[in-house]
Each structure stands twice: as C-alpha cells, then as structure tokens.
Image (cartoon, helix red, strand yellow):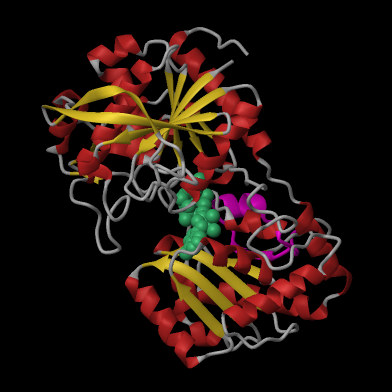
Amino acid sequence: MIRVLFASSEMSPFARTGGLGDVVGALPAALSALGAEVSVVLPLYRSIDRQKFVLAPFGGTRRAPVAGRSMSFSLQKASLGPVSVYFVDRPEYFHRENYYGTTDSDYPDNAERFIFFSRAVLALASLLEPRPQVIHCHDWQSALVPVYSAMDREYKVRFKDSATVLTLHNLGYQGIFPRVEMQTAGLGPSLFTPAGLEFWGQMNFLKGGIVFADALTTVSRKYAEEIQTPELGFGLDGVIRVCREKLTGILNGVDYARWDPLSDPFLLSTYGPGNLAGKAACKRALQRELKLEVDPKIPLVGMVSRLVEQKGIDLVTQHLSRLMSLKMQLAVLGLGAERYHERLRAFAAKHPGRFACHIGYQERLSHLIEAGSDFFLMPSRYEPCGLNQIYSLRYGTLPIVRATGGLEDTVIDLRDNPRRGNGFKFSAYTAEALRETVKLALSTYRKGGKTWDRLIANAFKADFGWETSARGYLEVYREAYRRKTGKELSA
Ligand code: ADP
Ligand code: GLC
C-alpha cells in the first residue's frame, strides 16, 4: 500500500476557490479506492467550520523555523471518508477574511505564510509513522516542500525515503517574491541562482519546486506541451524543458457524485440522457431565477468563471453588443477583476431579459447554470485543464471553448469529427473567432435534428471519472520513488 501525503492550500469541501480545491477534494479518495493510503494537509483558515467537520487536536504544540525564529503551531485532524485531513493552525497567518488576499491585492506576507506552511508540512510528515513515501504538492503554495526535502541538511536525511511530486495547476501563479524572502525561508545564497530559485532577480517558489521535485505533473497532456513553449510557459518554459523527462500530463477527473444531473440536489428537476424534459424544466427555472425571458426556444449560453484574463472574459466583454446581436441569452456567474464586474453589470442593466450576470461565488447557481443552459462558454486564453467543460458534457450542455490546454483535450468539435463531436472549438484568440463559433453553435441548435441529437448523446457519454487519472498518478508516484530512492514501491 502506497502512503501519500498531499500538501495543498485548498481542498473541497473545506476551502475552495476553484479547480485546485475540486481536485484535492476528489483525487485522494480515488487513490484510496485503488488501495493507496492518503492523507492531506492544509492551512486551517478561519472559514473552516471546526464543529461541522469534527476537527480534533492532533499532537501537541509544534514548531517551524521561519525568518530565523521558531514559530509555534498546532495541528487538528479530521476524516473525510478514508482520507485523513490535517490542518495547520496558526491564527496569525490563516485566520483572515480570505485565503490569499483581497480582490485588490495579495496579502503582503504571503511569502512568509507559505514558507511557514511548507515547513509545517514537513513537520507533520516527520510525525507520521510510518512516514509517507510520497509527498504530493500542489502549486506554488507548497512548492518549497521539494526544495527543503532535497536541500535542507536535516530534512535530506529524514526524508531520504520519501519522494516529492509537484502538480502544476496553473503557471500563471508562481509565488514570486523579493530576494529577501530567501532569508525568511532559511535558504542560502547558493540556491539563489538561475539553476535554483532565482528568477529575474527575485525568488520564485514554483521554480524551486520544478527544479527539485522528483516528479512533475500537470493537469492535461496538451498543457504539458504548452508550458514548454515561450507563449504559455510564463517565463518558466526553459526550466520545464530541462525537466521534461520528469513531467507527465494527467487530465483531471470529475467528481460525478457532486456533478451529475441525475442526482444533483441543487436541481428542481433531475434529468439524464433518457429524460430531457427535466433539462427543459431546469432551463425554465434558470430563466426565471435570473429574470431572463422565459422562452424554451431561445438558446441559452452559460458561463461560470473566475473573471480574470486567463478565462478569456475580455473576448466576451470587448464586443458584447456584437456578440449579443446573435439571437441568444447569456448568463454569467463570476467573480474577479472589478473592471469586468462593472462592464457586465452595466450591460445587464441595459439588456434585461437577454443578458444576466451574477457577480459572486455561488455553488448552487453554478449547478443551475450547468443544468439550465444549452451551451457553456469557456473562451480561455489558456486553460491547464478546466472542469466546467467536463461538467457541462455530463449535463448535456454543449461546451463552446477555445482550443487550448485541457479544453483541447476534452472537447471534440463537431466540424473535426461529425460522428464523435460533443461541442465547438475555436483557435484564434479573437472576439471575431468566438462570435463565429457561437453563431455556428446557435444555428446547429436551431436546425436540431440528428446532428443535434448526436451531439447531445456524445456529450452525455463522455466519461472523465477519477479512476483513470488516479491510476496515472500511482504510476508517477512509483517512478518518483524509484528516482529518489533507487528502490521499487511495493504495490
Ligand atoms: P480554475 O480553477 O482555473 O478557476 P476550473 O475550471 O478548473 O478553473 O475550476 C473552476 C471551479 O470553480 C469549477 O468547479 C467552477 O464551477 C467553480 N467556480 C468558478 N467560479 C465560480 C463562481 N463564481 N461561483 C461558483 N463556482 C465557481
Ligand atoms: C487551475 C487551472 C484549471 C484547472 C485547475 C485544477 O486553477 O486554471 O484549468 O482545472 O487548476 O487543476
């Protein structure tokens, strides 16, 4: 039985801002269904309900060195099915309004907070008996764990039999800080080089993780290729090319226990491939809730997204009037940059009945949009994996996506493959290309008939359960362990 410790800053249902939380919320259980013993460690944020999740103290006071000082903290433990979840409790760092900062700016002490977190992860790993054989880190927030475990004199010995794996969920967020944070981290100048954590004169957490992890993964095959190019490597493409032997692309799975229209508790009427009347009822309910004109015939396009550049929201807002000159309704749920909020709100005020936006983060509404829309729009500039297009397929809601990263790997365009097509894709990052593809999707909808029925049937059929991905990770763990220790992991 492989013993794995996940280190992450998010895990659904405890703390989630996007896909990272979804992945860490589901992958451990999928691995444990395959026989692995998985635990997870995350920060104890203020918003985590200790009573509801039955947190109990674990061990006594612990200490972690940060900025030359010894910081005390305690650990709490909860269980989520077969998975043990440990929480690092130090209120000064984590009892705040948000996880990483306000909508305007990051917390100024984020470097220190996540240096501390990485140290605390290793302190916990030292406590676990027997030790984890793999420490699986996610994104920049835990990317220093591989650095410490490979380069720190004490940890090197302690973790000689533990391999590190780092998953890159998004190269757009690297944890870049002033050089002085090397001291906060207790990392010497010999690591502040282009071959180490130095990045244009600053300290880069993610780069450190990339260099020192025993294996790297990212969340789709296509994205694994893209991050090796200057266009989408965010300045790290060179380092990633050097490390490509240890990089694997594994597509995220979907938690169908939470995202299935046959059993979704948020829906007024559940439905499935054999019962599309339920979907029509969901459309009606959504139109009503968002004060769109209630009309079963008008195609309804949905979007649920962080409203940031990555998601291609500028392609939507740039020429919104032109896009909305197409005969359709558009419903947007999102939260992000203020300039997009303003633009969307203003447009909604001018076009009631046809365009609705809800600025905020609302799980319930995100399910209603998945179910009630005919199409789901994801015009991302880049998309490591993307989950909503996969949810959409299961909800019989055809994705209209830009052909990038995981969107490329999961959506089959009708034009590329009329028999297997399950959605629509466009390549050029322009408002015009987006509009043309939406136009084609709408005319396909209007024509209906066999082509439409086949698209919907193909969408329902798509299966991205976690088991396949989990098998991929087990393979990576074995390889990482072999690389680190020269030994085989027993099955
Ligand atoms: P990312 O992690 O880059 O935001 P993903 O597609 O991987 O993109 O995951 C986004 C997840 O967050 C999905 O589960 C989506 O439904 C959810 N989500 C994003 N924005 C909102 C929102 N405003 N309200 C509710 N859920 C949201
Ligand atoms: C990131 C990516 C998204 C991916 C998610 C989970 O937030 O932006 O594409 O699905 O991580 O891996």
In magenta stretch: residue 396: yes
Where in the figure is residue 448, as x and y percent of width and height? 83, 76
Query: Which quadrant holds residue 326?
Result: bottom right
Up/down of 348 relative to 477, above or below: below
Quarter the C terminus occupies: top right
Where in the figure is residue 290, as x and y percent of width and height? 56, 80
**Residue 199 appears in the picture as rendered:** no
**404 or 397, which is in the foreground?**
397
Q: Is residue 83 left or right of residue 256?
A: left
* Residue span colored magenta: 395-416
Query: Which quadrant holds residue 459?
Result: bottom right
Say which residue appears at 50% left-offset and 70% top-offset.
333
Say which residue appears at 24% left-offset and 33% top-offset.
116
Say which residue appears at 80% left-offset and 56% top-offset.
420
Up/down of 372 relative to 388, above or below: below
Q: In this view, does 333 lie to the left or right of 204?
A: right
